[in-house]
Image (tube, coloured by chain):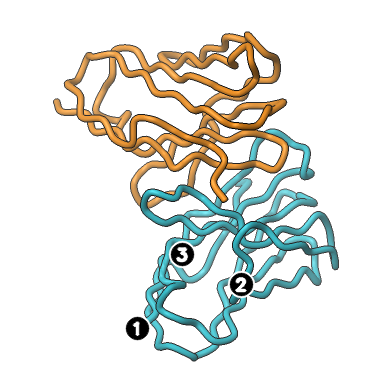
């Protein structure tokens, strides 16, 4: 089944403790992206990647890092999480940046205390 | 910052009623997309619009690409309980998303 898989689905952590949210897609998509969803703000793009070893900042990149060493994986790294990064995170992929439809993962709900 | 204004923010309707929501932008987009997010899941693409004035249907859903290319509308006819969720518009150049319309359908 074609899908985007995120792990974990839920995570509670403490301020300052580094964490990684994994994202993997099995559709051979070139383009991958991370979004955060907050009430009243919709989905805001954090980082995106147009291909292996090519990443770029989205609208809200502060406090996040990403890497794209392989085509299928696009992990989101929070080196020193803070409470304002408590949010619902989605990974998405598409054939290319110009493709009209994204496939989203099921989300990771992160709470930083 | 947010470039898309989506309204209404939320709707509470009775099963069987029709629903309308819209999205406006200060920028011109060359593609408009409508997604639905079921509770606990990621958004799923419902309809994609590519040309100004285009009207596209997907079952009970109908969406239109505004002539000015700065707006789009989504209508749901004869709503059913499984229509519950958050509906997002997205404008294609950089895939900007609206803040979403949360739909509740009372049986």
Q: Could you classify mark 3 by the number of other residues whose Cα lies within 10 Å: few (under 14), some (14-19), or many (20 or more)?
A: many
Q: Could you classify mark 2 by the number of other residues whose Cα lies within 10 Å: few (under 14), some (14-19), or many (20 or more)?
A: few
The colour with which the image depicts chain B is orange
Question: Going from the N terminus, do you reach mark 1 or mark 2 first?
Answer: 2
Q: Position of residue B27 (x, y in %)?
A: 65, 32
Q: Could you classify mark 1 by the number of other residues whose Cα lies within 10 Å: few (under 14), some (14-19), or many (20 or more)?
A: some
The residue that appears at 29% across and 33% down in the rendered structure is: B103
Frontmost of labels 1 and 2 is 2
Disc 1 target residue = A113
The residue that appears at 48% across and 54% down in the rendered structure is: A106
Q: Is residue B23 above or below residue A1?
A: above
Apparent side of residue B43 relative to residue B1 in the rendered image (left or right): left
Q: Chain of mark 2?
A: A
Disc 1 to disc 2: CB gap under 8 Å: no
Q: Nearer the viewer, residue B72 or B28?
A: B28
Disc 3 target residue = A108
Q: Chain of mark 3?
A: A
The residue that appears at 84% across and 63% down in the rendered structure is: A54
Q: Position of residue A80 (x, y in %)?
A: 54, 87
């Amino acid at each position: 089944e074609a899908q985007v898989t995120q792990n974990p689905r839920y995570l509670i952590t403490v301020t300052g403790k580094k964490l990684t949210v994994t994202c993997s897609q099995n559709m051979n998509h070139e383009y991958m992206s991370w979004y955060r969803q907050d009430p009243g703000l919709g989905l805001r793009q954090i980082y995106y990647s147009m291909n292996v070893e090519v990443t770029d900042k989205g609208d809200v990149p502060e406090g996040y890092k990403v890497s794209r060493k392989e085509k299928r994986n696009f992990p989101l790294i929070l080196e020193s999480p803070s409470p304002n990064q408590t949010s619902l995170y989605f990974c998405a992929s598409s054939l290319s940046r110009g493709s009209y439809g994204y496939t989203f993962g099921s989300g990771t709900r992160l709470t930083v205390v | 910052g947010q470039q898309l204004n989506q309204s209404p923010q939320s709707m509470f309707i009775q099963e069987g009623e029709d629903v309308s929501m819209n999205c406006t932008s200060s920028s011109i987009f060359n593609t408009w997309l409508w997604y639905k997010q079921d509770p606990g899941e990621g958004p799923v693409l419902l309809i994609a619009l590519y040309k100004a004035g285009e009207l596209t249907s997907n079952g009970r859903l109908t969406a239109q690409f505004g002539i000015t290319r700065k707006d789009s509308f989504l209508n749901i006819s004869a709503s059913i309980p499984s229509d519950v969720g958050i509906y997002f518009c997205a404008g294609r150049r950089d895939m900007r998303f609206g803040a979403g319309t949360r739909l509740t359908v009372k049986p």
